[in-house]
Structures are given as C-alpha cells and as structure tokens.
Image (cartoon, rainbow, N blue to C red):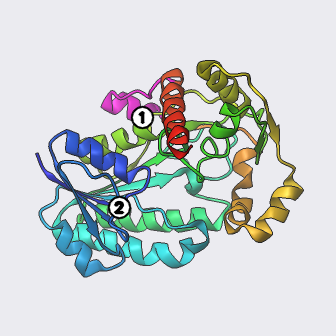
Amino acid sequence: MGKHVIAGAGQVGSRVARLLAEQGHEVVLLSRSGSGPDAPGIRRVVADVADQARLTELTRGADALYNCVNPPYPRWAQDWPPMARSLLAAAETTGAGYVILGNLYVYAAPDRPMREDDPLTPPSAKGAIRVRMWREALAAHDAGRVRVTEVRGSDYFGPGCLDQSHLGERLVPPLLAGRTVRYIGDPTLPHSWTYVPDVARALVTAATDDRSWGRAWHVPTTEPVTVREIADRLCSLAGVPNPGVKAMPHWLIRAAGVFSPMLGELEELRYQFVRPFLLDSTDFQKVFGVTPTPLEDALTETIAWWRGRLAAAA
C-alpha cells in the first residue's frame, strides 16, 4: 500500500480519499478548510495548494498527487495559474505521479462524440485555462521530469452533487417534490452525464496503473440521454409522477447572470447545452477494463442519497 495526497476535498476529492482508504492506502486530504470525510486512514490537513513549499512537504514520499481542486468559476483566471504551478512543481520535486481531474472544456464545440485526441481548441476562456494547465504538465512529462495523466469527465451527477451539477439540486429535489424543472439548455438534446463514483474510480485506476501516464483519458460514461429522459427514469425509479422539464428562456438566464456570478459565467459554456454534447470513453474502458455504472443503478443511488439528505434537513 502507498501514500496518496489529494488536493481538494469536494465531491470528487472526498470520494477518491474514501476509495483509497478502503483499499488500505495512506491518504492525505488537503483543503483550505480541512474538510472531508472523517474516516480511518484519511488525514485531513489545512493547506493552501498555491503554497508550493507546504504542498511539497506534504507530498514527500507519496506515490501520487491528485489535483481535484475546483475554484469558483469567477476566480479561475486568478486562482488556477498559481495552484497549477504549485501542484506540478510538488510532483516534480517529490517524484509523485501527478493525476489531474480535467473536464471537456478543452475541446471545441463538438459536432460528434469527443475523443481524447481531439484538437484542444476551446471556444471559452475557461477552456483555454485548462488547456494551458494540461500542456504545461504534459511538457514536463515529455521532458522526463514527472509522470502525468489527466482524467476528463462530462457533467457530473450522483451522491454529493449539489448546486454545481445540472442533475443535482436544480433537478432531483424539485422532481421528487412534484415541481416542474427549469433547465438552462434544451432538455430534448442527447448529453453525456458522468457518474461521480465512476470519476473517483477512474482517478484511482489512473494513479495506480503505469499505462495511464503521458496522455489524457475519458472517464467511463454511459450512453448519452436527454434531460427529459433522465427525469422520466428518475421519477419512475422513485415511484413519483414526473412533473416535467422545461427549457429556461435564454433571456432569463442572461438577466439572472447579472445578479448571479455563477449563472453569468455559464454564458460562455452555453454551447454545451444547446447542441448534442457527447463523450467517447472507449479508450479507458478497453485499456483498463473498467465500465461505467449502469444508469439505472446510478440514478437509484442518487435518489437514495437525496432522500436521505432531504429527510435530515426536514
């Protein structure tokens, strides 16, 4: 068993920590608040990822360093560069494998299912930031200074996915309560949705298999479905009537963005929700023999998690 250091204690980082601890690894989970699961084998540490000296010291002796950080959208331009430099430098200095949690912002607006070898020509400033991070890390790998891989998923859903998930707080609680959902895009278009436990499993697989280094991979993801299909299946599994999903008018989203920084930041990513947005995860599945969680199972777990959360809140 080895030592694994995880930067970021959010919905993915915390799940990666649990998975590694269950496998018997030593886990160090870093965040500015010291949050994360209080479980055997997990040491929660208060740390600023941009503090390179501190991060390097915590990473010494580690087999892998995971970048699961996710700064707020409005702060990407300010926060990502120093954190990315610090993470890469810590991995180089300590010899830890560097595993980056990525996303699909790095590709152009797609006209077919996205693959890992697609050109990195994003139409958004956020995508350009992620491309620079990956290219700098890959250049260090190619120069022999560090082992690097990046694992990219589509929009997340599942237990623990709250306000930043389009299939989270804005979808599941309203459906369970019988209220119509207002969706920011076209709810009739096929879209790839990545289950968060599958993201965690993919990261751990990449960190512990030497075949992962030197390229990006897509998280095993089920066949694309529309939001209306998701709502139908979720309500059927939950045993409740489906109140329906309607598109939120674009003018309303733009108006709301004036008062909500998060909604305002979504404007440049609108292309993902007004055209088919499809991910191809064939490579990861073939190389590592890992398949995505069946959608029905994933939705069943999601419903159970939300019902538990809503009951506790009540």
Which percent across, then down, holds residue 57? 18, 74
Question: Does residue 244 appear anywhere in the picture?
Answer: yes
Camera-nearest residue between 146 and 56: 56
Query: Who's the residue at 26% across and 67% down the image?
Result: 45
Task: Identify the magenta region.
Answer: 281-294
Which percent across, then down, holds residue 63? 17, 55
Which percent across, then down, holds residue 154? 55, 44
The three-letter code of the residue at mark 2 reads Ser
Q: Quadrant of the N terminus?
A: top left
Identify the disc placed on residue 35.
2
- Above or below 166: residue 229: above
Of helix, strand and loop, which one carries label 1? helix
- Above or below 297: residue 257: below
Q: Which residue is mark 1?
A: 283
Question: Does residue 150 appear anywhere in the picture?
Answer: no
State how far apart marks 2 and 1 are (Cα). Answer: 34 Å
Q: Quadrant of the C terminus?
A: top right
Camera-nearest residue between 302 and 113: 302
Query: Who's the residue at 37% across and 69% down the image?
Result: 33
Q: Could you tell which of marks 2 and 1 lies nearer the N-terminus?
A: 2
Q: Are there few (<14), some (14-19), or many (20+) residues within 10 Å of tag 2?
A: some
Camera-nearest residue between 251 and 31: 31
In front: label 2 or label 1: 2
Identify the disc placed on residue 134.
none
Q: Is residue 18 left or right of residue 130?
A: left
- Image quarter for residue 99? bottom left
The three-letter code of the residue at mark 1 reads Asp
Asked if the stretch drawn in magenta spans residue 59, the answer is no
